[in-house]
């Protein structure tokens, strides 16, 4: 799904404070372009909670990577009320608020479908804490390598039939009744946070689990355990489900919010970003792409 520009008239634009170049250098740290498989591209510590006043300096710097910016999607948690549009350096920029799963995330869209994802550090954050958060979010340091593991035993998981006799309530589950809105990284990718993302169609996640597990079987093998912060709807659904040998657990220690840990019977594990079902399609597609490390690609049709 290509992100389209919206040139329809909207509310009156708020005046921008500065033209490019920036009057004040924004407190911004970006990862290098070579780290394009990371979900967060950098971190920004604004000087106030006035989004319209803070954006001109930020976008003046980001335009080096993005070119003209036409849209900013922001988490309203730590901002004062912002206009629907503002004019910056002669360009109209659309401002859309959305409560993100990863708190205080900001998406900045260029006109050529390019995009950057920033972690915004609230303006009133203690200076020492903010500095450490800036450096950590923008770090390009590689994760420490895990000790070498024993060679994995061959597993015949090329298709469901090869894994065993089909059974409605046992793995391998049948072909999904509806293709899950799922995007995974390539096998050779080394994910920093996520191995991919899942955008369920409803808030009743357990009702969609069999389709998700079926789609993940070629990658994960048989699923043994899933750790997630299940909502009440999902827990109630689980109480009336037939046993299916999948152990549903509460989140693991240090598990990030809105992430799902799936562990196969052979020890293979995946971490998925779970995107809320009611997320706007363009934002969800952008999250799917970033979580799967496909920055710069156009998302598949996941509607």
Image (spheres, rainbow, N blue to C red):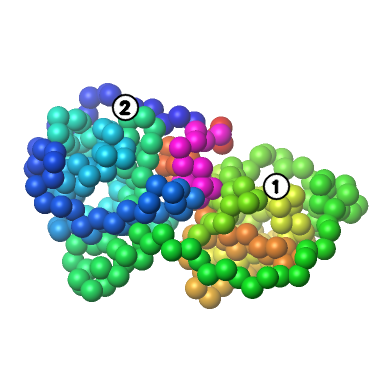
Query: Relative to 162, is 150 on the left or the right?
Result: left
- Dot label at residue 186: none
> Which is more toward the observer, 243 or 102?
102
- Give the residue displayed 44% in from the left and 49% down from the top: 34
Badge 2 is on which residue? Answer: 6
- Give the residue displayed 23% in from the left and 35% down from the top: 93
> Which is more toward the observer, 161 or 236?
161
Crowding at dot 2, Cα within 10 Å, few <14 / some 14-19 / many 20+, comes out as few
Magenta stretch in the rendered image: 287-300
- Give the residue displayed 66% in from the left and 39% down from the top: 179
Q: Are marks 1 and 2 in contact (CB under 8 Å)?
A: no
Crowding at dot 1, Cα within 10 Å, few <14 / some 14-19 / many 20+, comes out as some
Which quarter of the image is occupied by the C terminus?
top right
**Residue 234: percent from the left, percent from the top?**
59, 59
Badge 1 is on which residue? Answer: 215
**Residue 245: percent from the left, percent from the top?**
77, 65
Element at label 2: loop
Give the farthest residue toward the right: 165
Q: CA distance from mark 1 to mark 2?
A: 35 Å
The answer to whether 106 is drawn above or below residue 15 in the figure is below
Query: What is the number of callouts on the image?
Result: 2
* Mark 1 or mark 2, earlier in chain: 2
């Amino acid at each position: 799904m290509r992100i389209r520009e919206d040139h329809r008239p909207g509310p009156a634009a708020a005046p921008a404070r500065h033209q490019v170049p920036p009057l004040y250098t924004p407190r911004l740290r970006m990862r290098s372009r070579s780290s394009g498989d990371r979900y967060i591209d950098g971190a920004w510590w604004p000087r106030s909670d006035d989004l319209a006043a803070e954006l001109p300096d930020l976008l003046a710097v980001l335009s080096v990577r993005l070119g003209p910016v036409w849209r900013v999607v922001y988490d309203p948690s730590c901002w004062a009320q912002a206009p629907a549009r503002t004019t910056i350096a002669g360009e109209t920029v659309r401002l859309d608020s959305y409560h993100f799963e990863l708190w205080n995330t900001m998406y900045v869209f260029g006109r050529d479908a390019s995009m950057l994802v920033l972690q915004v550090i609230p303006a009133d954050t203690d200076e020492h804490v903010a500095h450490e958060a800036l450096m950590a979010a923008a770090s390009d340091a590689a994760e420490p390598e895990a000790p070498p593991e024993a060679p994995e035993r061959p597993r015949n998981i090329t298709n469901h039939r090869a894994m065993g006799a089909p059974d409605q309530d046992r793995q391998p589950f049948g072909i999904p009744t509806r293709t899950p809105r799922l995007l995974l990284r390539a096998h050779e990718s080394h994910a920093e946070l996520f191995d991919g993302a899942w955008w369920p169609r409803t808030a009743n996640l357990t009702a969609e689990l069999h389709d998700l597990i079926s789609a993940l079987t070629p990658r994960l093998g048989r699923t043994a355990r899933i750790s997630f912060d299940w909502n009440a709807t999902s827990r109630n659904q689980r109480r009336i489900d037939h046993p299916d040998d999948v152990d549903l657990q509460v989140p693991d220690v240090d598990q990030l919010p809105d992430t799902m840990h799936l562990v196969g019977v052979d020890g293979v594990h995946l971490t998925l970003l779970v995107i809320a079902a009611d997320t706007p399609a363009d934002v969800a597609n952008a999250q799917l792409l970033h979580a799967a490390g496909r920055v710069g690609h156009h998302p598949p049709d996941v509607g």
